[in-house]
């Protein structure tokens, strides 16, 4: 009996993965700080504390974990910083919803008690996220965990705000911003999702006060008409030249609006007459600034109409639109209404339609910051490198066309803006600490979540303090993230790092795509096609999920979730488990196994050479972040070369050296697999003799050192090709796999191939074939093996009399089918009345029967020439 009892007879992920992670954490395997090693660092893209991790998080973090485990095995001091994001709008919306269930709102309990609730939410969901990280097996350094609103990060945020303000890069200004009426806060442009929806273009009649002439003016948002301030036409438009300087009556409120001219107006679009609503449209705002027009707002911050709107005051904006249009129709104001397909902005967080809205906000002046990043992208040792490279263009193009960033949010959950106003003098004070005295009132707003997230790569290491971690681990080596947040996060980290640290935040950015369902659709609640990674882990195990996620998509490409491929990953892990048990079965308890280079068989040399090639391919692709290629190369080696071939070959050579080779190849293979599937490889590693402790403390394997014999390796390659062909021939001719067979193989010159005794023994052991030095007589079955040709006499492959009898029966059956088909298709009653598809199907069937009959007849003819095997 060998050592197979060290592994359970059957692989079960629920047992293999239970409690192992807790042990890893307790042993401190993932805690960085070994200064004798070269540092390697990365920071986790912090998940929002709004709920559970989804499949995209599982993919993103598994890619990072593979990288960390690979680098640890290579001897690096790996620092992978975990953490979470406070996610201002999203978390506040969740807490608001919870309060609503209790029948109260945040305004009922006040800011301080609301923040207590938000912190409680954070603790609840942070605990959930940590459990999910554990389930995934992520090798995070929990001693360095951070949160975007912890004390240290808050200090960093305040310092950056104050520095930017003092440098003239942060300012307050009134602008048309994106307003979320549900969250009642401003949004930046990239927090708005534009969706194509069917709306309406409303054409209304405005009367010119002085002449009674009617102007038809179009709008998609009638509810904003109460804030109209002017009517514009083009100065060169002859149709309207005579009315410039006159007034048009606003049908919403009866006000007289000045008719003005500006070449901004497009004479080819619509009626070429435009109403100007400065506080509710960015283009109208620009015109109002140009002509110093008033900018009244007709809407409250919750999307209801204010006191400017008369009888419509208090109505929801869309209710007002409907009521106003109905009243206009009764009054004869409506010229006509057209359906209008257009892009409408929606809040990324709450999903409501965004309202363009005039508001006083805080902005970051972006051009100078972006230019610094772009300048350094031209310097090889300063630039951020993207994988794939094409995403650098996405990154730089956005920076080249950047607009000022609205950073203030009308929320309670977030970093409070460090600005105070004197209630007596109106003086503004910006500083990291509150000014002295009771006269100062702090700005009610908080900062955009991305403002603090942009500091993540260096604030997590203690910046602005000059810490040892900052010195050792910053800039980080690699960021792994999706292409969907290059604008949101990657670009912002780039310019904040350049401004705050005069450095890049990371050297490389590995970009992955989005996870979609099997049909290529985005996963969403509305489609009901989402997949909870924890459900997959409960059923198939984390190792199977990890291997699927990381071996089915190239960098930058989307990944389609396919349960059958997760099953395939599980099957591969099961194969590794069973192979490990087989190897342990060959080992005697208490024995020490080491390879004797002088006693290597051809198959030993072959598998060791194959491993060396696999190792080189894996390393090359891992270093290029091509984890899918590396994983597939590795799977091919383990499944095919090691399990399907070498283990089978080892059964024909039960020497001690073969056992040593089996063990050593398995050890090295397990090490290569461990970044992908840490749970099962750690379990197997601890079961193998000669390993010390957890695989987390092991080293990346070296290649085998031996004096290879190219001729022996070529011979083994040929043997395996012969085995494959013989197995195919036996299957084709319904021959038992265990039945002996004589074959002939000739090289490109026509000479018979001979094999060494060991290779011949392997051939016999794997497919019960014996090599002849004479070409078979009579009819043969042949296969080409590169430049070689394999032949086997048909008498070797079949029992001639039995096969002839079988073919005779088959030809009789086919003749009957042919007669039936011909009779049916020659019957006009069938061909004229049956559906065309049915006639076509029967015609095709008849053709197939005729082809099968011809083939069977030819096979029978060949067999008729063969002398039965004695």
Image (spheres, rainbow, N blue to C red):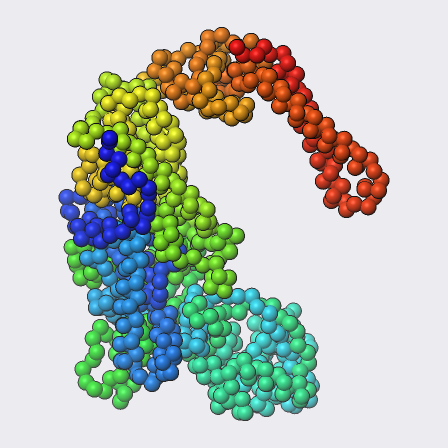
Left or right of residue 162: residue 282: right
Q: Identify which residue is drawn at 32% across, 30% down.
A: 611
**Residue 321 place in picture, x, y as percent:** 57, 82
Q: Name the spot of residue 484 as percent of width and height, x first.
A: 42, 57
Q: Is residue 431 visible?
A: yes
Instruction: From the top left corner, tell me how far across and down residue 774 is, in percent.
Output: 49, 7
The foreground one among 585 and 323 is: 585
> What residue lies at 32% left-to-right and 17% top-to-bottom?
709
For image coordinates 43% across by 77% down, the residue present is 182
Q: Is residue 360 visible?
A: no
Q: Which quarter shows the N terminus? A: top left
Q: Is residue 742 above or below residue 172?
A: above
User: Between 113 and 315, which is closer to the camera in this rendering?
Assistant: 113
Q: Is residue 216 left or right of residue 514?
A: right
Up-down: is 112 above or below 861? Answer: below
- Name the outermost residue toward the right: 828
Q: Could you tell me residue 644's position as x and y percent?
A: 39, 30
* Total numbered badges shown on the rendered structure: 0
101 versus 484 height, above or below? below
Q: Is residue 507 above or below residue 186?
A: above
Q: Nearer the viewer, residue 544 or 350?
A: 544
Residue sitting at x 51%, y 83%: 316
């Amino acid at each position: 009996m060998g050592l197979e009892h060290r592994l359970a007879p059957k692989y079960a992920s629920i047992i293999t993965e239970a409690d192992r992670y807790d042990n890893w954490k307790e042993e401190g395997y993932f805690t960085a700080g070994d200064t004798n090693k070269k540092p390697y660092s990365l920071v986790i893209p912090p998940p929002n504390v709004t709920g559970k991790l989804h499949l995209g998080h599982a993919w993103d973090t598994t890619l990072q974990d593979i990288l960390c485990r690979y680098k640890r095995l290579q001897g690096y001091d790996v620092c992978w910083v975990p953490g979470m994001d406070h996610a201002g709008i999203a978390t506040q919306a969740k807490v608001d919803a919870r309060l609503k269930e209790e029948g109260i709102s945040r305004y009922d309990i006040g800011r301080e008690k609301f923040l207590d609730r938000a912190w409680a939410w954070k603790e609840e969901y942070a605990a959930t996220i940590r459990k999910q990280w554990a389930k995934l097996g992520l090798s995070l350094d929990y001693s360095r965990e951070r949160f975007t609103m912890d004390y240290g990060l808050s200090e960093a945020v305040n310092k950056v705000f104050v520095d930017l303000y003092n440098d003239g890069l942060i300012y307050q200004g009134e602008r048309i911003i994106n307003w979320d009426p549900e969250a009642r806060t401003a949004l930046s442009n990239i927090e708005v999702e534009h969706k194509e929806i069917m709306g309406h273009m409303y054409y209304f009649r405005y009367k010119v006060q002085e002449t009674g002439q009617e102007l038809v003016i179009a709008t998609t948002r009638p509810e904003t008409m109460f804030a109209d301030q002017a009517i514009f036409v083009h100065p060169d438009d002859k149709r309207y030249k005579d009315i410039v300087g006159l007034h048009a009556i606003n049908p919403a409120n009866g006000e007289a609006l000045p008719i003005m001219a500006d070449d901004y107006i497009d004479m080819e679009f619509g009626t070429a007459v435009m109403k100007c609503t400065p506080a509710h449209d960015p283009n109208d705002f620009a015109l109002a600034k140009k002509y110093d027009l008033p900018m009244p707002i007709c809407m409250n911050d919750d999307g209801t109409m204010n006191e400017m709107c008369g009888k419509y005051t208090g109505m929801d904006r869309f209710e007002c639109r409907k009521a106003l249009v109905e009243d206009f129709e009764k009054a004869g104001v409506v010229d006509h209404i057209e359906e209008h397909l257009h892009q409408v902005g929606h809040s990324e967080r709450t999903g409501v339609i965004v309202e363009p809205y005039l508001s006083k906000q805080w902005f970051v002046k972006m051009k100078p910051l972006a230019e610094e990043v772009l300048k350094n992208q031209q310097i090889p040792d300063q630039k951020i490198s993207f994988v794939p490279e094409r995403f650098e263009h996405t990154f730089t193009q956005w920076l080249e066309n950047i607009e000022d960033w609205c950073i203030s949010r009308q929320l309670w959950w977030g970093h409070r803006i460090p600005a105070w106003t004197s209630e007596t003098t109106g003086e503004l004070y910006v500083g990291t600490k509150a000014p002295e005295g009771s006269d100062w009132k702090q700005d009610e707003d908080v900062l955009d979540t991305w403002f603090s997230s942009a500091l993540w790569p260096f604030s997590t290491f203690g910046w602005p303090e000059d810490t040892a971690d900052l010195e050792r681990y910053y800039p980080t080596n690699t960021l792994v993230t999706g292409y969907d947040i290059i604008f949101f996060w990657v670009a912002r980290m780039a310019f904040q790092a350049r401004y705050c640290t005069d450095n890049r935040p990371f050297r490389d950015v590995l970009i992955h795509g989005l996870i979609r369902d099997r049909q290529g659709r985005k996963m969403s609640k509305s489609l009901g096609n989402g997949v909870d990674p924890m459900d997959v882990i409960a059923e198939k195990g984390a190792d199977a999920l990890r291997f699927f996620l990381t071996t089915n998509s190239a960098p930058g490409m989307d990944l389609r979730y396919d349960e059958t491929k997760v099953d395939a990953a599980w099957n591969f892990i099961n194969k590794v488990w069973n192979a490990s048990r087989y190897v342990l079965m060959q080992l005697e308890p208490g024995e020490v196994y080491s390879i004797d280079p002088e006693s290597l068989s051809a198959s030993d040399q072959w598998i060791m050479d194959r491993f060396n090639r696999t190792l080189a391919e894996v390393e090359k692709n891992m270093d290029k972040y091509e984890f899918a290629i590396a994983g597939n190369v590795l799977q091919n080696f383990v499944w095919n070369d090691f399990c399907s071939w070498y283990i089978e070959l080892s059964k024909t050579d039960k020497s001690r050296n073969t056992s040593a080779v089996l063990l050593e190849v398995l050890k090295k293979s397990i090490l290569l697999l461990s970044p992908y599937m840490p749970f099962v490889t750690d379990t197997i590693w601890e079961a193998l003799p000669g390993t010390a402790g957890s695989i987390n403390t092991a080293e990346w394997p070296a290649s085998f050192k031996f004096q290879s014999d190219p001729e022996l390796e070529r011979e083994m390659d040929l043997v395996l090709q012969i085995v494959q062909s013989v197995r195919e021939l036996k299957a084709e001719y319904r021959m038992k796999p265990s039945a002996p067979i004589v074959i002939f193989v000739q090289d490109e010159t026509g000479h018979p191939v001979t094999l060494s005794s060991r290779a011949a023994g392997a051939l016999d052991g794997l497919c019960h074939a014996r090599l002849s030095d004479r070409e078979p007589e009579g009819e043969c079955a042949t296969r080409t093996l590169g430049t070689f040709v394999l032949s086997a006499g048909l008498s070797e492959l079949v029992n001639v009399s039995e096969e002839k009898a079988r073919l005779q029966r088959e030809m009789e059956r086919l003749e009957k089918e042919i007669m039936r088909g011909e009779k049916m298709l020659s019957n006009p009653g069938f061909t004229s009345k049956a559906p065309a598809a049915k006639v076509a199907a029967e015609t095709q069937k008849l053709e197939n029967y005729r082809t099968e009959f011809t083939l069977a007849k030819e096979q029978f003819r060949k067999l008729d020439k063969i002398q039965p095997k004695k």
